[in-house]
Amino acid sequence: MTVKSKRGRRRYVAFITSPEMTKQEMVDRIPGGRTFNVIQCSEGMAIVRCGPSDVGRCEEAVRACDPQAHAVRTSGTLRTLRDEYPVLKKNAPPRPPRRGTPPAKHRVPRYTCADSRVIVII
């Protein structure tokens, strides 16, 4: 697991944008290059990641690419924003699989009871 002192802390800013704005349009138009990362944008809401000291500049950059946009909440986690705004949760991209863990298998019961006798299935 990466230590926050090496990677740095992050802030996620939720915006209300114009309904026709897409993620690709926002990525192409937003000034600041790689400083701000558009996590998702659809149905009039967007999430942009930035550093804790760049929140103000992030708001200005998003307003520069979409004048109707305004920030509604800043959080340290995506989960908090998605729990508060259902449209963000509904349109969230699928999570990538975790490294090092095999996919979940269908569990088969190891023990079954029949006529009060225990049978072991191997």
Image (tube, helix red, strand yellow):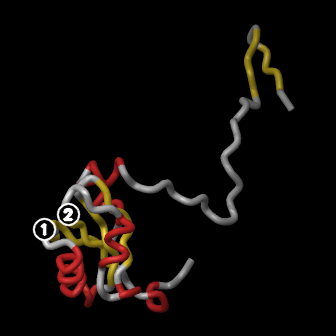
Give the left or right position of residue 44, taking residue 101 as reference: left
State how far apart marks 2 and 1 are (Cα).
6 Å
| Disc on res. 45 | none
Spot occupied by residue 60 in the image (x, y as percentages of width and height): 18, 83
Q: Does dot 1 land on a helix, a strand or a loop?
A: loop
Q: Which amino acid type corresponds to the residue marked 1 in the rendered image?
A: Gln
- Quarter of the figure with the C terminus: top right
Spot occupied by residue 45 in the image (x, y as percentages of width and height): 24, 59
Q: Which residue is under mark 2?
A: 17
Residue drawn at 25 percent across, 57 percent down: 20
Residue drawn at 26 percent across, 90 percent down: 53
Q: Quadrant of residue 80?
A: bottom left
Q: Does dot 2 land on a helix, a strand or a loop?
A: loop
Residue closest to the far right: 122
Mark 2, residues whose alpha carbon is within 10 Å: few (<14), some, or many (≥20)?
A: many
Q: Which residue is under mark 1?
A: 68
Give the left or right position of residue 118, taking residue 5 as reference: right
Label 2 with label 1: CB-CB less than 8 Å: yes
Give the left or right position of residue 112, taking residue 36 as reference: right
Residue drawn at 51 percent across, 57 percent down: 95
Q: Quadrant of residue 17?
A: bottom left
Mark 1, residues whose alpha carbon is within 10 Å: few (<14), some, or many (≥20)?
A: few
Q: Which amino acid type corresponds to the residue marked 2 in the rendered image?
A: Thr
Q: Which residue is at the front of the view, 14 or 80?
A: 14
Q: Which residue is at the front of the view, 12 or 43?
A: 43
Spot occupied by residue 65 in the image (x, y as percentages of width and height): 23, 76
The answer to whether residue 23 is above or below residue 1 is above
Spot occupied by residue 9 in the image (x, y as percentages of width and height): 37, 84
